[in-house]
Every structure is written in C-alpha cells, then in structure tokens.
Amino acid sequence: MNLDKVIAVRTTKTVYRDGDKCIKLFNEDYSKDDVLNEALNQARIEKTGLNIPKIIEVTTVDGKWAIVSEYIEGKTLSQLMKDDPSKAGEALDMLVNLQLEVQSKKSPLLNKLKDKMHRKIDEADIDANTRYDLHTRLEGMPNHNKVCHGDFCPSNIIIKPDGTPFIIDWAHVTQGNASADAARTYLVMWLSWNEELANRYLDLFCEKSRTDKRYVQKWMPIVAASQSVKGKPEERDFLLSWANVVEYE
C-alpha cells in the first residue's frame, strides 16, 4: 500500500491515492466502531445504485484503521465553482438535483436521523432549557425514512472528466427527514461559502422539492446543535448561535 500521494488532510484522518485506490487513514485514537460503521454505511449506500466509490476493504496500517475504496478521477464541485464563479447557479442546480436523487432512496438498515440528533443534543454545550426545547422540537418533527447524506456539499461531489457526478464521504449518512439534511447543507454553505450562496441554495431546494422554507428553517437549531458537538472550534460559536434560536409559534 503506497501512502506517498496525499489527497486531503483532516483533523482525524488523512486521505491518500494509490493508483486506482483511495485510502482513508484514520488517526490512532479514532474509534474502531466509528470506522467500521462508516464502511458499513457506505456499503449499504452502494446497494441503492447511487454513483459512489465502492468499498474495497477495511484494514489497518501501522496500527491505524483505514478504509480503502475506489479512487474517482475528477474535480470536486467546490473546485469547479471556485475556478469559474460565473457557473455558481449551474453548480447549485446540480447540487440540489443530486441531493434530491439521494433523498429519493431508501436504506432501511441505516441509523435513524432523529436518534442520532437526540444523542448529539445531549452532548452539545448548551443550557438545560435550550436542550429541552430542542429535544421537544425534534420529537415533534415528522418521521420520514429518506436517505440523508449528513454532509451534502460541493466538496463531497466529484465530477469525472466525462461529466458524471459521484458522491463521496458517507460517514454521517442516516435515514430520516430530507429537510433536516437540507438544513445541514444550508449551514455548511454559509460556513464554507457565504450567506448569499446559502440562501440561493435553500430557495432552490425548496422550489425543486416543493417544501415550505419555514419547515426547513425549523430544523436549523436542531441541526446546528447536533453539528456543534464535533464541529471545528472556529465554527462552534456560529453553530451554537443557531442552536439557541428556538422559537415556538
């Protein structure tokens, strides 16, 4: 296994390319159950027929866990948007269409989105009253069973040279409510890009999915609280500010 070519470096992992293989090598302290769960989730999504990299093996390298999957040649949608900002509208259209395709799928063995968010709210750095309000709001949301990527954004979409899009990074996938997944994408777009692009995304998602924007917005405090637990330190204040916006009609 050749680890000479680094593709990406993250807080808890480093991604390498070895020929036609992509090797995601986790830090020594990364838990075995999280690695195996991620690989299992990706294998389950393979069965939906979506364009994703196929798992080749799960192994260890010098005592560190690694997931080996197909390497997908191409540029991320994020790179393409930065290379040509004038095509942002076209890129957002593709982003939403792909997200709706993902959400059209079912995978009954995936973890439930609501269960995961209840756990994350318990771990969030928020006061007891806000935690109670968020649990109450979450419990009152409709129960759905659509595939929700959990981190659907331009950097997790690779466009092959022939134009075929592939969706990567299925570590956070669950089954649940599509609007929760849209709320997550909205917050990521704001953090990674800007508020204006995030709003354009949300308008387009709501238009194409025929969803009332206010319904997606009701999910945002819940999603923000959940994401703040493992969010980057520099993003935590932003996410917690959203988590504290809990208003009831």
Image (cartoon, rainbow, N blue to C red):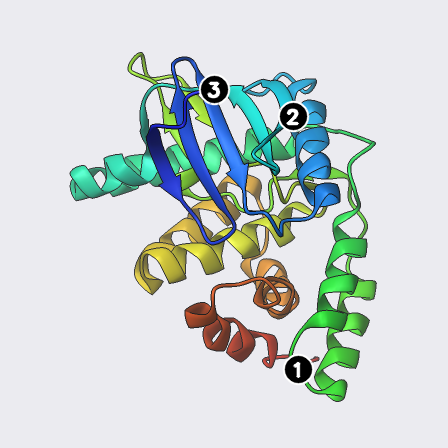
Q: Quadrant of the C terminus?
A: bottom right
SS for dot 1: loop
Q: Position of residue 45 (x, y in %)?
A: 67, 26
> For the residues marked 3 and 2, what is the alpha-carbon distance in whole angstroms?
13 Å
Residue drawn at x 58%, y 18% is: 54
The residue nearer to you, when weighing 11 against 130, is 11
**Badge 2: few (under 14), some or many (20 or more) residues near its Cα, within 10 Å?**
some
Query: Is 243 situated above or below 231?
Result: below
Q: Would you place residue 136 above or below residue 56 in this image?
A: below
Name the residue carrying label 2.
Answer: 58
Callout in the foreground (1, 2) = 2
Query: Are discs 3 and 1 less than 8 Å apart at CB?
Result: no
Of residue 2 and residue 225, the one placed in the foreground of this image is 2
Q: Earlier in the sequence, mark 3 or mark 1?
A: 3
Horizontally, is 69 left or right of 226 in the view?
left
Name the residue type under label 1: Ile
The residue at the point 55 percent across, 50 percent down is 182
Q: Quadrant of residue 15?
A: top left
Expressed as whole percent of the image width and height from the top left, the position of residue 211 reads 59, 49
Mark 1, Cα crowd under 10 Å, few <14 / some 14-19 / many 20+, is some
- Earlier along the polypeptide chain: callout 3 or callout 2? 3
Circle 3 sits on which residue? 1
The residue singled out by tag 1 in the image is 126
Residue at the image point whose x is 81% and y is 73% from the top: 136
Report the Cα–Cα distance between label 1 and label 2. Answer: 36 Å
- Depth-wise, is mark 3 or mark 1 nearer the camera? 3
Where is residue 213, by image quadrant? bottom right
